[in-house]
Image (tube, rainbow, N blue to C red):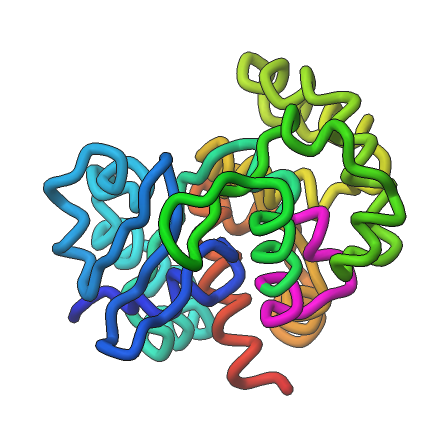
């Protein structure tokens, strides 16, 4: 079975990508614009190889999920082959601050407007995501004008406390989870998403409204430790499956 690249790129892990008229997926990352149509297109590029976590044996993990219980089996078979992206830590943090009480389409729009206003133009229509230094002069009013809403002061606080982004690299998961929450507006869910998709910390299992529906309906007698050691991929499968089946 081929990778479900559309779900990987547009299923809530990242907000960097867009689909072009010829069916290619494109994103401004690592100082350039990448265009791919299949995951195989990423295999020869060292940056994309790490970004798509291509050196991890996901098939073995998917086999483990299929054998764990019927819901995870259905999720894996219906969603298809997905994997966990390893993104830039700062970009992941701000992306998931933006994700609070928001939907993927709106998050992607805000993400793009932030890039256009504060990032650097790479080529026509593509801008890098702004660094903390590039966001340093941003005011709350300016950020709100881009659609960030109540999240504007959270972004400003993240810029002020940018050292945390590097600090958590050396911390164990629980300590990193707490340290990220020293940033205004960052709770357990945003911190967990940041650690998974920015730091490759697959111990995370963020609980949003979709995951809560799944847990309440199918796993009410289970602790989150039930999903260990495949927490992050289990969560991503259940999140994707719930969005399609538990509306």
Quadrant placement of the N terminus? bottom left
Look at the picture and state if 46 lies above or below 163: below
Is 36 placed left or right of 189 in the picture? left
Number of dots carrying numbers: 0
Q: Nearer the viewer, residue 237 or 191?
A: 191
Residue placed at 49% from the left, 70% from the top? 240
Q: Nearer the viewer, residue 121 or 19?
A: 121
**Would you place residue 3 above or below residue 181 in this image?**
below
Does 169 appear in magenta? Answer: no
The residue located at (52%, 37%) in the rendering is 203
The quarter in which the C terminus is drawn is bottom right
Q: Main secondary structure of the magenta part?
A: helix
Judge from the rendering whether residue 51 lies leftward or rightward of residue 22; answer left or right.
right
Give residue 194's quadrant in the image.
Answer: top right
| Chain part drawn in magenta | 96-108
Which residue occupies 82% across, 40% down? 154
- Residue at 85% x, 35% y: name it: 184
Image position of 75 (left or right of 180) = left
User: Does 193 appear above or below 22?
Assistant: above
Rendering coords of residue 32 (x, y %): 32, 41
Residue 38 pos. (x, y %) = 18, 63
Please state the horizontal and vertical placement of residue 63, each as a whole percent of the image.
26, 58
15 sits left or right of 82 in the view: right
**Residue 106 lies within the magenta run:** yes
Outermost front residue: 124
Which residue occupies the foreground of this view, 57 or 126? 126
């Amino acid at each position: 079975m081929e990778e479900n690249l559309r779900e990987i790129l547009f299923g809530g892990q990242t907000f960097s990508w867009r689909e072009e008229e010829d069916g290619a997926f494109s994103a401004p990352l690592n100082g350039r614009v990448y265009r791919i149509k299949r995951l195989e297109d990423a295999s020869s590029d060292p940056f994309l190889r790490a970004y798509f976590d291509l050196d991890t044996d996901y098939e073995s993990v998917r086999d483990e999920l299929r054998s764990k219980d019927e819901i995870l089996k259905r999720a894996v078979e219906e969603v298809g082959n997905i994997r966990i992206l390893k993104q830039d830590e700062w970009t992941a943090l701000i992306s998931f601050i933006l994700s609070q009480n928001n939907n993927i389409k709106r998050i992607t729009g805000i993400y793009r407007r932030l890039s256009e206003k504060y990032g650097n133009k790479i080529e026509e229509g593509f801008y890098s995501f702004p660094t903390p230094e590039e966001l340093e002069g941003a005011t709350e009013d300016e950020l709100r004008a881009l659609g960030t809403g109540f999240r504007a002061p959270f972004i400003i606080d993240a810029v002020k406390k940018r050292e945390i982004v590097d600090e958590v690299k050396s911390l164990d998961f629980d300590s990193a989870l707490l340290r990220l929450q020293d940033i205004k507006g960052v709770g357990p869910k945003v911190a967990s998403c940041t650690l998974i998709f920015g730091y490759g910390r697959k111990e995370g299992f963020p609980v949003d409204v979709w995951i809560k529906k799944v847990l309440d309906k199918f796993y009410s007698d289970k602790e989150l430790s039930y999903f260990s050691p495949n927490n992050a991929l289990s969560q991503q499968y259940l999140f994707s499956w719930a969005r399609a089946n538990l509306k």
